[in-house]
């Protein structure tokens, strides 16, 4: 028993030292304008009031502006999107929010990278960082079964490239101590800035493999994990009587031309929505897409700049408020082009 107490005491001391070290490293090196900490603080303040959630990758956090949409639709929403967000991360972020809030609507910005990508470790870590409570953080980590992501999530120090960077630490601490915030953060999870319009120079010659869709391969192109967690989200919505909607965001014509079988992809989105009992708004088929969402609306070949985000939110709110929302869309790429 005496030996056990000695060992336990030493383990406790080591644990406390690690916690103190990790806290110090995070405070010194975690960027002062990190959107994650601002977002979590907002969700803490809004706990018990959020009725609408927006989820997805960086495409979605540059698209859905809860402040604008709430004003027009009378909702109280939050954008839970994260960079490269895997659907597994979206599921746990949704679970946490649904447990704490009277959520009635969930919008997921579906995209090819969301469905096809073998997400990088940092994307899973980003979802972990955005979870507010240890209860859901631990559940998420237990579900991951990936040791390297577990270590990176729990030990912030593993993400610090160098500890000898006094200028960066000084700037970071100065801003934190004066309570500065980032001008690029638009409140409630929306993140966008004006930037330069897309001019064709930032696009690759051809879309990446995860940005292509081949009709002959169908759903075999989609990651199994993505389908599993999309099913889980749909089941949760059925159980909690939450309205689930998939939104396909517009992109530059160059990006859409590189998808290969775009009509087949749009048909797959329709089939997927039907299977998941979800509504679908496909803005690739928005009737005025070519006139409204020109290259000026984008910062690169598929991400909105603020100008495009503003235009999208005005139109999206109008579609949601309409008694006949499908009148805004063509039924197929063939119809759109004719």
Image (tube, helix red, strand yellow):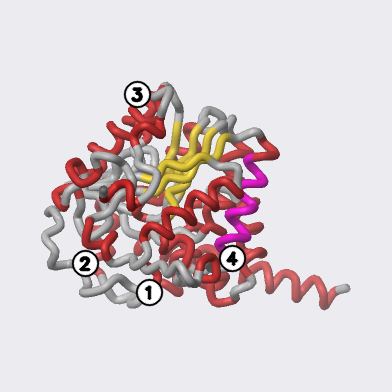
Residue found 35% across the figure and 77% down from its top: 161
Q: Would residue 119 be found to the left or right of residue 209 on screen?
A: right
Q: Earlier in the sequence, mark 3 or mark 1?
A: 3
Q: Would residue 174 be found to the left or right of residue 21 on screen?
A: left
Residue found 19% across the figure and 41% down from its top: 292
Q: Would residue 121 be found to the left or right of residue 334 on screen?
A: right
The residue singled out by tag 1 in the image is 209
Label 1: state its secondary structure.
helix
Magenta residues, as a range?
A: 226-237
Label 3: state its secondary structure.
helix
Residue with the most extreme front position? 338
Task: Give the CA separation, mark 1 to mark 4.
Answer: 18 Å
The residue singled out by tag 2 in the image is 167
The residue singled out by tag 4 in the image is 225
Q: Is residue 235 part of the magenta span, yes or no?
A: yes
Nearest the viewer among 283 and 114 is: 283
The residue singled out by tag 3 in the image is 72
Provide the major secondary structure of the magenta segment: helix
Judge depth for marks 4 and 2 and give the one in front: 4
Q: Earlier in the sequence, mark 1 or mark 4?
A: 1
Label 4: state its secondary structure.
helix
The N terminus lies in quadrant: bottom right
Q: Residues within 10 Å of mark 1 (few under 14, many from 20)?
A: few
Q: Would residue 200 be found to the left or right of residue 138 on screen?
A: left
Label 2: state its secondary structure.
helix
Task: Give the CA separation, mark 3 to mark 1.
Answer: 38 Å
The image shows residue 293 at horizontal and vertical percentages of 21, 45
């Amino acid at each position: 028993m005496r030996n056990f107490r000695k060992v336990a005491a030493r383990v406790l001391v080591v644990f406390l030292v690690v916690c103190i070290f990790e806290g110090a490293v995070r405070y010194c090196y975690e960027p002062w304008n990190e959107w994650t900490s601002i977002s979590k603080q907002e969700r803490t303040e809004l706990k018990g009031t959020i009725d609408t959630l927006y989820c997805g990758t960086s495409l979605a956090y540059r698209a859905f502006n809860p402040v604008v949409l709430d004003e027009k639709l009378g909702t109280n929403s939050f954008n839970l999107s994260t960079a490269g967000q895997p659907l597994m991360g979206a599921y746990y972020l949704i679970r946490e929010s649904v447990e704490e809030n009277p959520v009635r609507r969930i919008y997921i910005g579906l995209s090819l990278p969301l469905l096809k990508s073998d997400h990088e470790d940092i994307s899973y870590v980003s979802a972990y960082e955005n979870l507010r409570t240890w209860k859901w953080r631990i559940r998420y980590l237990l579900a991951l079964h990936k040791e390297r992501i577990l270590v990176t999530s729990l030990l912030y120090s593993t993400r610090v490239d160098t500890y000898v960077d006094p200028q960066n630490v000084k700037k970071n601490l100065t801003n934190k101590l004066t309570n500065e915030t980032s001008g690029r953060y638009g409140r409630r999870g929306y993140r966008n800035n004006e930037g330069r319009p897309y001019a064709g120079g930032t696009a690759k010659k051809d879309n990446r493999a995860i940005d292509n869709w081949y009709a002959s391969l169908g759903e075999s192109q989609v990651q199994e994990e993505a389908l599993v967690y999309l099913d889980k989200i749909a089941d949760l919505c059925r159980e909690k009587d939450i309205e689930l909607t998939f939104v396909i965001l517009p992109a530059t014509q160059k990006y859409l031309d590189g998808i290969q079988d775009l009509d087949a992809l749009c048909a797959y989105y329709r089939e997927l929505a039907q299977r998941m009992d979800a509504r679908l708004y496909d803005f690739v088929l928005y009737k005025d897409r070519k006139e409204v969402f020109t290259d000026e609306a984008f910062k690169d070949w598929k991400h909105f700049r603020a100008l495009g985000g503003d235009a999208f939110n005005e139109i999206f709110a109008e579609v949601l408020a309409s008694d006949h929302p499908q009148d805004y869309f063509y039924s197929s790429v063939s119809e759109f082009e004719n």
